[in-house]
Image: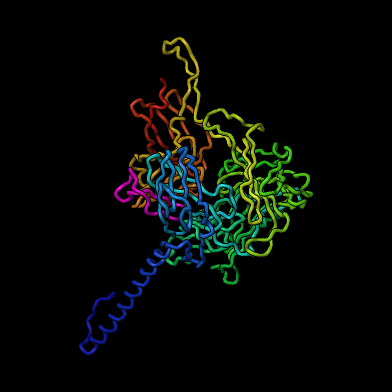
């Protein structure tokens, strides 16, 4: 391209000059293009010592100074009893830690205090925002690269107000690094005023039933566009801003093209948030209009339509791309969900795994009265709260002989991002908003499992008996937040034991009976199992290099930093980067089916309804684990042996399954 061709002496100098100027311009252009791509990547990874940052794609500012607390934040570990984390954001703790002041994060453990950090730095990585607390004390089990204690607080978008917005991920007793997730609206892009809404329901005048789709807003969904990109979707709310989910403000459907070098073209708005579903000719749907011009018709914009259909028994449902409409500008999606069924009993709900939770017994209980700050609160569940509340009132408070409505009752149970049930009473009395103007009072009642039964233990306390308790968690910003602990909110785990009838007479023992296969000792609540890969040569191409497989037994995976498979997944595959960070995660199934025995020394466990199969989007990934007795194997380790029809087959030799 830039070779020197022969020329006459009279024109050689001029020819060379023009040719090399053209080559130089071309090289500069290529250099600029490469530099631009690198700059785009660099702009998506940065840090700041301040407590706010400017989002690099849309220029929005995330200001976390509102998370500062004079008393600090306290989170107790659900893993190791007695461990307590105290930290502050945008400032230090007001008390000392191990006798030292000017401390931002502190760990209380076995009567001792350890400094986790004296200040923090705010990081932005491809949409993920987190605080890294630095200058912790030396850790006994530290490494050469990380010799000191560290705390990371991951700030994740949640448009709702939850009673427990913070939770600690699992960790080993001798770990040096800890991770806390903090769900907050401050990590969300602002919803445009014209798109604000706290409801997402419609009444079908034909059947007189009401459809409420708001529970589907608790998480984002992804579905392939059948090419090299993905649709990121939220229902009833904008896409929750986060890692590789940086959709334009107010968009509920956007196309994510990971190969786009221009970061403003990586996420294209294919539909603004729509909180008003409609029923057209008996079909429940949401129609999302986009401000983005259609590539096939410059006079029209893109539109995305999500069609909802009823299936009471579907598990872990998510929208699937169905194709383009006749106008080549309308993108169509199908979403099969129990929420599209209009014959649910009041105060009942199906979980994402299709378990029916029935809280209707609470609606017949007498209304409850709580007292806080001189106010008498009256609350009922899925029912009218009675006097002194007004007609249709589900909650109210009385102060100085005046009754204030805190919202009208309804019986539509919903789920928040953590999977907890809640009720939302809206349209209460007018309330002066902290941001200026007026809003209306609302009441959010979160239901928390009060049953301590786990695994295959007896479900003591299940039913309508004792264990119920109500507590006011917060009363601010025109919303009353209540936590209601009840056994009715508990879900039933799958069984990790199986029985098999054995005829011992054939062995000369003279008797027969039932033997128990019990895998509960393999259930891990602190770490996940990492599988070895031993595939035949003909299948090795199905597993990309640097791919790892993480599994647990009879329960979901233990939450781990950066392992982003769908919540509740029991098996996950991920490509691991050179620095050990998982990416491109895919759920390989959920623990929906109890353990089944094959014979005295072998049992099988299935995980179903995973993400779409990489080479067949119409099929969901699933996992099959075959446990075999091997007295010398100890607890053992899962080994990937084969992949057939999008089913990943693992073998696990262990002495746990061996009969004595």
Visual colour scheme = rainbow
Front residue of 131 and 89: 89
Specify whether residue 152 is painted magenta: yes
Q: Is residue 508 above or below residue 160?
A: above
Magenta stretch, main secondary structure class: loop
Nearest the eye: 473 or 219: 473
Left or right, residue 656 beside residue 475: left
The residue furthest front is: 99
Image coordinates for residue 35, horizontal then vertical, percent: 36, 69
Check the image and name the residue furthest to the bottom.
Answer: 10
Say whether residue 524 is magenta: no
How many marks can you see? 0
Q: Nearer the viewer, residue 131 or 531?
A: 131
Residue at 59% x, 29% y is 460
The residues colored magenta run: 130-153
Quadrant containing the N terminus in the rendered view = bottom left
Query: Residue 447: percent from the left, percent from the top?
Result: 62, 42
In the displayed structure image, the side of residue 203 where residue 109 appears, left or right: left
> What residue do we see at 33% from left, 52% from top?
578
Q: Is residue 645 visible?
A: no
Residue 524 spot, x, y in % from top left: 44, 36
Q: Nearer the viewer, residue 649 or 114?
A: 114
Image-based side of 252 in relation to 284, left or right? left
Q: Is residue 532 above or below residue 227?
A: above
* Residue 153 seen: yes
């Amino acid at each position: 391209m830039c070779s020197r061709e022969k020329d006459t002496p009279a024109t050689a100098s001029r020819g060379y000059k023009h040719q090399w100027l053209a080559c130089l311009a071309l090289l500069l252009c290529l250099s600029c293009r490469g530099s631009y791509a690198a700059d785009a990547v660099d702009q998506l990874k940065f840090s700041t010592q301040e407590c706010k940052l400017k989002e690099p794609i849309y220029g929005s500012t995330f200001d976390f100074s509102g998370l500062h607390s004079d008393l600090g934040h306290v989170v107790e570990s659900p893993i190791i009893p007695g461990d307590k984390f105290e930290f502050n954001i945008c400032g230090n703790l007001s008390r000392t830690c191990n006798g030292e002041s000017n401390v931002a994060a502190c760990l209380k453990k076995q009567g001792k205090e350890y400094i986790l950090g004296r200040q923090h730095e705010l990081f932005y990585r491809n949409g993920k925002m987190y605080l890294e607390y630095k200058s912790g004390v030396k850790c006994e089990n530290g490494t050469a690269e990380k010799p000191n204690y560290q705390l990371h607080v991951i700030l994740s978008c949640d448009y709702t107000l939850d009673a427990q917005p913070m939770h600690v991920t699992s960790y080993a007793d001798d770990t040096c690094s800890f991770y806390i997730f903090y769900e907050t609206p401050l990590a969300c892009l602002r919803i445009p005023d014209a798109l604000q809404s706290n409801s997402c329901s419609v009444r079908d005048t034909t059947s007189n039933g009401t459809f409420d789709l708001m529970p589907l807003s608790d998480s984002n969904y992804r579905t392939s566009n059948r090419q090299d990109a993905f649709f990121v979707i939220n229902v009833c709310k904008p896409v929750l801003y986060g890692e590789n989910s940086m959709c334009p403000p107010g968009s509920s459907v956007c196309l994510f093209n990971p190969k786009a070098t221009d970061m403003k073209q990586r996420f294209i708005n294919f539909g603004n948030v729509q909180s008003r579903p409609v029923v057209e000719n008996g079909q429940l749907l949401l129609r999302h209009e986009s401000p983005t011009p259609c590539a096939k018709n410059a006079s029209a914009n893109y539109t995305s339509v999500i069609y909802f259909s009823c299936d009471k028994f579907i598990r872990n449902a998510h929208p699937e791309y169905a194709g383009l409409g006749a106008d080549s500008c309308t993108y169509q999606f199908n979403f099969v969900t129990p929420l599209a069924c209009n014959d649910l009993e009041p105060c009942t709900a199906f979980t994402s795994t299709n378990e029916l939770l029935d809280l209707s017994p609470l609606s017949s209980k007498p209304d409850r009265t709580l007292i806080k700050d001189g106010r008498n609160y009256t609350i009922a569940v899925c029912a009218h709260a009675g006097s002194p509340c007004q007609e249709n009132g589900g909650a109210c408070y009385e102060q100085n002989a005046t009754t204030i409505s805190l919202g009208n009752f309804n019986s539509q149970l919903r789920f928040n991002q953590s999977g907890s049930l809640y009720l939302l009473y809206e349209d209460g009395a007018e309330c002066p908003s902290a941001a200026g103007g007026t809003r209306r009072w609302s009441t959010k009642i979160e239901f928390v499992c009060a049953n301590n039964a786990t695994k295959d233990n007896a479900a003591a306390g299940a039913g309508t008996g004792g264990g119920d308790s109500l507590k006011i968690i917060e009363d601010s910003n025109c919303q009353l937040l209540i936590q209601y602990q009840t056994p009715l909110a508990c879900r039933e785990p799958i069984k990790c034991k199986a029985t098999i009838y054995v005829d011992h007479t054939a062995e000369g023992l003279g008797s027969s009976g039932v033997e128990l296969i019990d895998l509960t000792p393999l259930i891990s609540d602190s770490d996940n199992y990492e599988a070895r890969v031993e595939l035949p040569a003909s299948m090795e191409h199905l597993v990309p290099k640097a791919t790892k497989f993480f599994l647990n037994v009879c329960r979901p995976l233990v939450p781990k930093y950066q392992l982003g498979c769908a919540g509740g997944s029991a098996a996950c595959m991920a490509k691991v980067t050179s620095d050990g960070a998982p990416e491109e995660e895919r759920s390989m199934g959920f623990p929906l089916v109890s353990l089944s025995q094959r014979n005295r020394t072998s049992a099988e466990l299935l995980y179903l309804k995973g993400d779409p199969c990489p080479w067949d989007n119409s099929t969901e990934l699933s996992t099959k684990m075959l446990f075999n007795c091997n007295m010398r194997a100890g607890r053992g380790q899962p080994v990937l042996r084969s992949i057939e029809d999008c089913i990943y087959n693992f073998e696990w030799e262990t002495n746990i399954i061996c009969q004595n």
